[in-house]
Every structure is written in structure tokens, then in C-alpha cells.
Amino acid sequence: MAYQHQLNPWVIHQLLPSLKQHTIARFRSRAEAEGYVKVVTRLTPNAKFAIAFDAGSASPTKSTAKPAATPSMPSAKVKVSIS
């Protein structure tokens, strides 16, 4: 995720037919995004919009290196009791 996108995590998407979406704008706060959606909805009443928080990529980056071989270790069993 680019640094500029990290600064503006609130995203407005225009919902299009056939489950497609188009990013309209990005904002720093949810209040700014909600205000913008109100204005855009008045200008294009037939369009649908959604506000989302873009937390970034949660998946780890792919590595081309092979993991080092580790010796097999016995698995530890943990017993948890909640009273």
C-alpha cells in the first residue's frame, strides 16, 4: 500500500452493475467521507456509494527463498481451564 493511501484510509466506492466498484475518493476521517457521500448522492441520485476503511494488505509478501529445514520437534500440548 502506498504511503498516500495509508494517510487516507477511508475510501468511497461507487457500486457499479455486475458487482464492480470504482474508487471515487479517499479521506483521512470517516466524517469527511460521509459528508462527501451526501454531496455526491445529491448530484447523482441514481448511483450507489459505499464507504470502506482500507486497512492495507494483511497478507505477507511472497518470498522466493526456500525455508530452512528444521528438525522435527515434539508438539507441545497446552491445557487451558477457564473457571
Image (cartoon, rainbow, N blue to C red):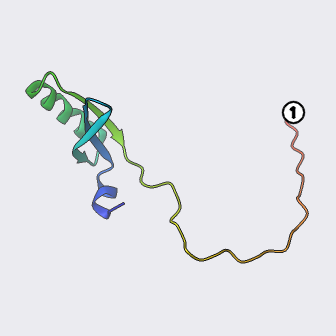
Indicate the quadrant containing the N terminus: top left, top right, bottom left or bottom right. Answer: bottom left
Q: State the image quarter where residue 24 is shown.
A: top left
Q: Residue at position x 88%, y 59% from top?
A: 75
Q: Position of residue 72 (x, y in %)?
A: 86, 69
Indicate the quadrant containing the C terminus: top left, top right, bottom left or bottom right. Answer: top right
Q: State the image quarter where residue 12 is shown.
A: top left
| Number of marks in picture | 1
- Residue 44 to residue 82: above or below: above
In the visual, does 59 lie left or right of 67? left
Residue under pointer 1: 83
| Residue kind at label 1, given as amino acid type | Ser
For the view shown, which residue lies furthest in the front direction?
A: 18
For the view shown, which residue lies furthest in the top direction?
A: 46
Label 1 SS: loop
Q: Nearer the viewer, residue 13 or 19?
A: 19
In the visual, does 55 lie left or right of 4? right
Q: Position of residue 58 (x, y in %)?
A: 50, 54
Q: Position of residue 64 (x, y in %)?
A: 55, 74
Q: Nearer the viewer, residue 32 or 12?
A: 12
Q: Position of residue 30 (x, y in %)?
A: 30, 39
Q: Residue at position x 28%, y 48% from top?
A: 28
For the view shown, which residue lies furthest in the left direction?
A: 43
